[in-house]
Image (spheres, grey):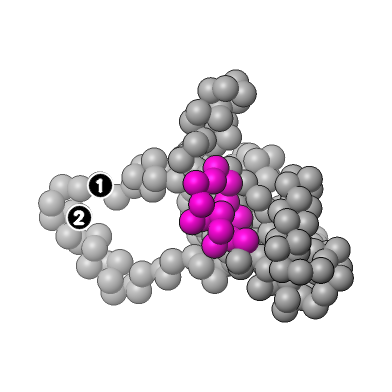
Amino acid sequence: MINNEMKALTQALLFASGEPLEIARIAEALETEISVALKVLEELTAELESESSGLSLLRLYDSFQICTKRAYADKIREVLEIKRNTPLSAAAFEVLAVVAYNQPVTKSYVEQIRGVDCSGVISTLTQKGLIEEKGRLDLPGRPLLYGTTPEFLRCFCLTSLSDLPDLPEKDELKKDTENDEDTGVQLSFGSEEEKNQSDIEG
């Protein structure tokens, strides 16, 4: 099978799947090695980005998925009459951040960090498919462990958790907080929520 045929078959597989497809399954369909399949996917990604195409290729860990480009999201919603999901609250963003940077974590760990009950927020994030159960902790009561999902990566345009931005150092965070207090600016997650709202919705 020549390279162009491999790219065409790969694109057809991803389109027909509609869900993230593991690289091992793609390589099996192409009857080739994983390293060769990865090269085919890299070339397909470059072609979709350079062409006047409404599609792009996402990588989620060791899986790939074809999706529409973000620039056309509003028009797609309008034509298909897709309703926007309720945007995440500031509390939900905070819980999601705690889980993402410390996973796997228990509900009690999240509540210890935030200082309030998080049952409702965790339930909402689970329903939205942004976090999921990752087993149980080997302690009395066997509390559930939570972690992020591939949907979380897709929504925030991340390939893997290693793409998460570094957390600020304590001294840097303290300095920023003092500067905000001096200028009368109140720290909040509002701006971050607005920044990511379009990725979470839909």
Q: 158 or 135: nearer the eye? A: 158
Type of amino acid under label 2:
Asp
Point out which mark residue 186 bears: 1
- The answer to whether residue 54 is magenta is yes
In the rendering, at what x and y percent does residue 104 appear?
66, 65
Query: Residues in magenta?
Result: 44-57
In the image: residue 113, left or right of residue 42 = left
Mark 2: few, some, or many residues within 10 Å (few <14, many ≥20)?
few
Type of amino acid under label 1:
Gln
Q: 68 or 174: nearer the eye? A: 68
* Residue 62 seen: no
Image quadrant where one finds the N terminus:
bottom right
Check the image and report above or below for 17 versus 141: above
Asked where in the image residue 45 lies, by quadrant, the reply is bottom right
In the image: residue 107, left or right of residue 98 = right
Q: 30 or 152: nearer the eye? A: 30
Numbered disc 1: secondary structure: loop
Q: Residue at x 29, y 74 (%)?
A: 171
Mark 1: few, some, or many residues within 10 Å (few <14, many ≥20)?
few
Q: Are marks 1 and 2 in contact (CB under 8 Å)?
A: yes
In the rendering, at what x and y percent does residue 101 appear?
54, 65
Q: Which residue is mark 2?
A: 180
Numbered disc 2: secondary structure: helix
* Residue 188 seen: yes
Check the image and report above or below for 84 versus 101: above
